[in-house]
Image (spheres, helix red, strand yellow):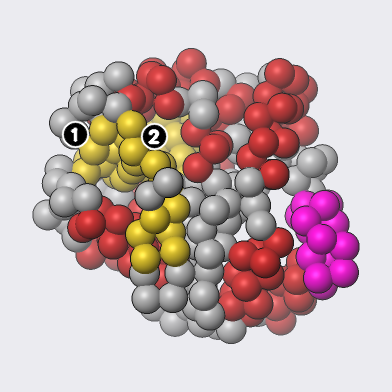
Amino acid sequence: MPFYNSENAAIYYEIEGQGIRPLVLLHGYALNGLMWELQRQAFSENYKLITIDLRGFGKSSCGKCWSGADMANDVKGVIETLGLADVAVLGFSMSGPVAVRLACEIPDIVTRLILVSSILPSSGRPKSPGETRLQERELAALEIGGIDAWLESISFRTGPLVEGMFEKNPAILPLWEQIISRHRRDYLLCMLRSRLNTISNIDWRSRLEKIRQKTLIIAGSNDLKFIDASHHLAGAIPDSKLVIIEEAGHMVNLEAPEEFNRAVLGFLS
């Protein structure tokens, strides 16, 4: 099992596929690299596929720091360790802004950008009291009740982000439980405690117009909470294309894997 040892965390990653061109897949909040199981075969046939557990999730530890900058630096470390070039980076939801950072910071290495169900990058504003209270409630749930209580607090077994996925593709439930079981309570505790101290004071949103990589933006038509962010990204990034997958929600790669895979592979080819 390969790990990249950053300054304060051990970052787990997997490599497969015989292709020359690298494709790096980043997961969303409360997920890990297993969320790409329905993409592995299709993507690894033509690309060198690298899936990463971001710090605090899955098999990756966290350390005392957790932020978009830390996650971007971890991914850069994996890319540099493997000596990758001409890299396509895919960011999903929480990791969309991480992929944006990489596109801005190492544009000579990251040459294609894919943003899926992405949130918007930080605008540089201070964290609101409401955000702090939500984060404190998550931490308390994990401290008192463990991972199951934490998952309940973020509606990750029931709730608008996942209910459509289970209704449309009930066979996904065993994989979903496998994704959840990969998490470690001690790593999550470290991540949640570190997140409370995270300060986002850089306006990355204003830098979207400076992105020069060809960019694919994918959203599900039923992802009502986040689809506006996808439209904003498509309007702000100059060389971008927006693909809306009908009747799919936030977990678009798991709800409509065939359509999703076609969109990504068509863009990369």
Q: Quadrant of the C terminus?
A: top left
The stretch drawn in magenta includes residue 142:
yes
Q: In which image quadrant can residue 21 be found?
A: top left
The numbered disc on residue 82 is none
The residue beneath circle 2 is 242
Point out residue 3 in the picture as x, y percentages from the top left corner. Answer: 39, 55
Q: Which residues are magenta?
A: 140-154
Point out residue 205 in the picture as x, y percentages from the top left corner. Answer: 39, 65
User: Is any part of residue 74 visible from this angle?
Assistant: yes
Point out residue 25 in the picture as x, y percentages from the top left corner. Answer: 40, 42
Point out residue 29 in the picture as x, y percentages from the top left corner. Answer: 59, 53
Instruction: In this rendered view, identify the residue nearer to me: 45 or 153.
Output: 45
Horizontal relation, residue 149 to residue 179: left or right: right
Q: In which image quadrant can residue 202 be found?
A: bottom left
Which residue is at 63% across, 46% downward? 182
Q: Secondary structure at mark 1?
A: loop
Which residue is at 79% across, 41% downward? 157
The amino acid type of the residue labelled 1 equals Arg
User: Is any part of residue 209 visible from this angle?
Assistant: no
